[in-house]
Structure formats: structure tokens, C-alpha cells
Amino acid sequence: MRRPHVLGSLAILAITPFALTACSGGGGAAAGGDAGTLTILDYYNNEPDKTLVGDALDRCADDVGVKIKRETVPGKDLIQKVLQQSSSKTLPDVLMLDNPDVQEIAATGGLSPLSDYGVDTSGFAKGILDAASYEGEVYGLAPTVNTLGLFYNEDLLAAKGITPPTTWDELKTAAAALTEGDTYGLAFSSIATYEGSWQFLPFMWTNGGDEADLTTPAVAEALQLQVDLVNSGSASKSVINWSQADVNDQFMAGKAAMMINGPWQIPALSADTNLKYGSVQVPVNKAGQTPVAPLGGEVWTVPVTGDKDKQAKAAKFVECISSDENQLALAEARFTVPTKTALAEQYVAKVPEMAAFTEQVANARSRTGELGEEWPEAATEIYTAIQLALTGQATPEEAFKQAAAG
């Protein structure tokens, strides 16, 4: 989860172009181009990710025996680019999608199921296969994923004799004790975007809440936790405006002793030689509950271009990107987690600071796993309710009812 989810109703408007592309048997540039070259579209347009991912793509080009022509665009522009290519029948041979977008694109008929090419999907974490599936078919593979955890400032906790919290009660107690001067005990993102919803999910899901019914006590309890933290002064009222980048800034500046965030922050945290930090899984409501967090990450897919031979090569390419070798190489370089569960022990031995996130991924869930294409509506209701409750306009119970009513 690094960019806002922007698909929404655009995909609905694009169903007809996608369907025409899938049924026409013509793939435009993809079908009529060099048979030995695969076109690739992704949103890794910034360094170091652009080069790190590019190295993996080059390895797979050699393995599959093809040349590649790669195009990168900013994350916010990817879906619009895909829709334009669909309309003009110039879809790439290999397409990277943010995992919440896969089901909506697959529903249009624009993607080819990997089972058509005998791609082996065994051994992958269930959550990421759920994210890449539509109507029982797997449409893509993710070499690595990310999720959320609780980071803590080791020096600040040690000074108070506090161990990293594992339950909500421990979290509230620790956050209160660590709040001092201009330092809050905990920072998190409750901004009115999908980012705020993403950060709420570990608390909601772990407590038994479900996006299919946001009016249950389990969901309200999760929101009450955030309300209690803000109202007690253990968390800043500004959380309603903070992105995850803002949260990390607060933590690195010493203005938050703990934060909810993802492993993509580790390079910046580690670059600060004066900061000693650790991470654990997001605390649960009651001891014995299994921590459940959302999966972030990108899925590599095979668009329907009408060129069966190139689609078969593209499928081999997608399979290669998620090979053990590439999963470990990308995970180590990018502080993400391999999606094959059998690689976890080997990975953590090499990158111990990723232990909590790797453990979390085993139980992590796809945001679209239950509601599919309807997830964006639920995400909007979640962040709307959070804003209502944290600004004192409604109780957690009433906030979700109001959000659902529009």
C-alpha cells in the first residue's frame, strides 16, 4: 500500500473496451509487434525500485528467451493508462497492477487466467492468491508483498521500562506513559483516503470485524480504540490529516514513540544513525487473538492481447518474476516479504528486521478478498466513519451507520 487506489468507476466505464479487446482477437501493438519482444507496463518509476525491479525483469527476459520493452508511469496514472490502452487495443504483454485493482480489471475480461498456461500457483500465501483471483481463477502473481506493523523507539520505551505492547490495553497504557512534552505515545494515519482505511484494517479484522457488515460491535470497538487514544491525548488530533509518510516523519522527529506503519519506511529509519527502533505485529484486542493485517503489493498479470503465443511467453515471464530467486532478491533489496511461505525462514535469517512483517504476512488478508469489486465502497465508508468519530461528530457505532447511509 503506497499509492491511493484510483480505479473506482473508471473500470466500470471501461468494461466495453476491455470486452472488445478480449473478443476481437486483435491485440494492436502487442499482437502485431516483434514476436521476440514482450512489452511491460508498471509504476515503479522512481529509484531505487525502478532499477531493482528492472534487474529482475532483465533476469526473466534471459530465462524466457525474449527481449523486453518496458514503460513505467506514476502510480496515480497507471489505471488511466491501462484504460486508454484497452480502448486502443495496445495493452502490454505483461501488466503490473496494484493488488486491489486486479479483480476489477479481471472482471472486464482484460486479463488471462494463469491456469490457461499451466502456471504453478502452489506455495503462495493465501491472501495474495485471493487478491489476484476472480471467480475462482488466479490472474496474476506477486513476488513480494508488504503489510503493517507497530514500530517503536527503543530508547523511549527503555527509559520508561516499557516492553512493546501486544494487546490494546497494553497499547493504551504504553502510549499514555510515553506521551510527554511534544512527544505523543502513538502515531497512525486516519486520513480521509484509502490510506486511513488501510491503517484501520488490522484493528478491525483482528477483532473479528468484517467489511461485509461495518455496523457490528467488533468494528465499533476497533474505532473506539482510536477515539480513546486521541481523546486521552496519547495520539495527536492531527491523525485525521496524516498520511503514512507524515506518520513516519513524526516518528523520526521524536514526536511519536510508536507508530503504525509499513516496512517501506525501514530504509529511511535505518539511515538515521541516532534512531534505534524495533517492530512487532499490530497489537490485538485480547491475548490469544491472531493478528490480521492487510496485504499490500503489486501483481504481475497477462493481459488478453489476442496473440496467443506472446500471451504464453508472458505467462512464463510472470512465473519467472515470482521464482524463489527473484522473490528473495526483491524482498531483500526492497524490504518486502516473499509471497511463498516456504521462503520465510530463509528470508528472515538474512533480513531480521523484517521478522514481524514476515510473520504477519502469513495471516494477512486481501482487501478485495471478500467484497471484490465492491471493496472501494467499503473503504470509503470506513474512512468516513473514522473522520466522524475522531472529530467528535458521532460515536463509533453511529459513525458507521451514518457513513453507510451516505
Image: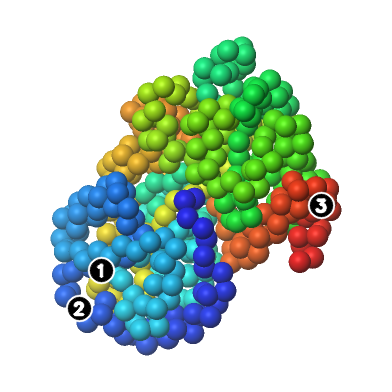
Residue at 47%, 70% (x, y): give it.
Answer: 105
Q: Amino acid at mark 1?
A: Thr
Residue at 57%, 34% (x, y): give it.
Answer: 259
Query: Where is mark 2, residue-wise?
Result: 33
Front-most of residues 17 and 172? 172
Front-most of residues 126 and 168? 168
> Decide: marks 1, 2 in contact (CB < 8 A)?
yes
What is the spatial separation of the Cα atoms under label 2 and label 3, in whole angstroms?
58 Å
- In the rendered structure, the answer to whether residue 152 lies left or right of residue 317 reads right
Front-most of residues 362 and 160? 160
Q: Position of residue 68 (x, y in %)?
A: 20, 64
Query: Does dot 3 land on a helix, a strand or a loop?
Result: loop
Between disc 2 and disc 3, the foreground one is 3
* Total numbered labels placed on residues in the image: 3
**Circle 1 crowding by C-alpha within 10 Å: few under 14, some 14–19, many from 20:** many
Query: Does dot 2 land on a helix, a strand or a loop?
Result: loop
Which numbered marker is on residue 334?
none
**Circle 3 crowding by C-alpha within 10 Å: few under 14, some 14–19, many from 20:** few
Between disc 1 and disc 3, the foreground one is 3
Q: Position of residue 291 (x, y in %)?
A: 61, 36
Query: Where is mark 3, residue-wise?
Result: 393
Q: Amino acid at mark 3?
A: Gln
Name the image colouring. Answer: rainbow
- In the rendered structure, the answer to whether residue 140 lies left or right of residue 202 reads left
Which mark is first along the chain, 3 or 1?
A: 1
Query: Where is mark 1, residue-wise?
Result: 39
Which mark is first along the chain, 3 or 2?
A: 2
Q: Amino acid at mark 2?
A: Gly
Residue at 34%, 64% (x, y): give it.
Answer: 73
